[in-house]
Amino acid sequence: MRNEQLERPEAHEGPTGVPATRAAREAAARRRAKVRSPAREQVSLGRLFRVFLVLGATSFGGGVVAYLRDALVERQKWLDDETFLAGLELAQTLPGLNATNMSIYVGGRLRGVPGAIVAFLGMMLPGTTVVLALGTLYVSHGHLPAVAHVLAGVGAAAAGLIFATTLRIGRKHLVQPLDLSLVIITFTVVGLLRVPLVIALLTIGPLGVWLYRPRPGRGPFEDDGERAAA
């Protein structure tokens, strides 16, 4: 009798009566694999420090997001686009620079607390040294028109890098009407109405969390497209 019950399809149904199909089980396994970090013991602390030291020395201004994605996703392959985007969202909601927050996130994900410390030091050391040197020069030469032109050019390049990175990592996520609606609302509130970022974060942030809350028959990391495919 027990074997017959196990062979019946009803025996594999969950509490909501939805059959636990093979596709659904595979989707759940993929989600669990995203949470785990198989590279945790594969990346040495020395390599982690060198990678972020180079990032800190070669990335500039707001364009650091583009450098981070190119290094961590494209070259090192420590993260995929979805994990990188999750880390970036976390870094943007926390106090401090996005670059340093991301270094702590990635270092901690790969090697725990020692990795977070090493990655943070590697990311901060070049910038701290350069800023101290440039600050000294700016005090004596900041009034020159050429300096203002250089800074304007760096700002334009950073804006272009941010836009290019948004297109590369956002094309996979900003495809649903709800996603685009939140982007438009945020842009309007912050960019056009000039509402302080803290107020926008405390209002639009909870709204987004509520709209994407887990629902019956939908896992916490599963979107509508993945559920339909399953």
Image (tube, helix red, strand yellow):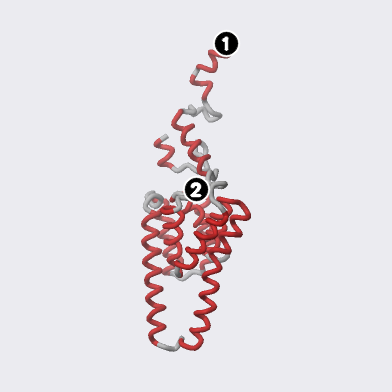
Task: Say the numbered circle drawn on residue 98.
Answer: none
The quarter in which the C terminus is drawn is top left
- For label 2, the crowd category at 10 Å Cα-Cα, with few meaning under 14, some 14 to 19 and many 20 or more, is some
Give the percent coordinates (x, y) of residue 84. Answer: 47, 53
At numbered mark 2, what does the secondary structure look like: helix, strand or loop?
Answer: loop
Relative to 142, does residue 216 appear above or below in the rendering? above
Residue beneath the point at 57% across and 46% down: 41
| Residue closer to the observer: 157 or 209 | 157
| Residue closer to the observer: 51 or 168 | 51
Residue beneath the point at 46% across and 71% down: 194
Quarter location, residue 193 = bottom left
| Residue closer to the observer: 226 or 26 | 26
Residue beneath the point at 49% across and 69% down: 195
Residue indicated by mark 2: 212
Residue indicated by mark 1: 1
Give the percent coordinates (x, y) of residue 61. Answer: 46, 70
Amino acid type of the residue tagged 1 in the rendering: Met
Query: Residue placed farthest to the top in the image?
Result: 1
Amino acid type of the residue tagged 2 in the rendering: Tyr
Give the percent coordinates (x, y) of residue 111. Answer: 58, 51
Query: Residue placed farthest to the right in the image?
Result: 113
The quarter in which the N terminus is drawn is top right
| Residue closer to the observer: 92 or 46 | 46
Q: Nearer the viewer, mark 2 or mark 1?
A: 1
Give the percent coordinates (x, y) of residue 188. Answer: 42, 65
Cα gap from disc 2 to disc 1, whole angstroms: 43 Å
Quarter location, residue 62 = bottom left
At numbered mark 1, what does the secondary structure look like: helix, strand or loop?
Answer: loop
Relative to 11, does residue 224 appear above or below in the rendering? below
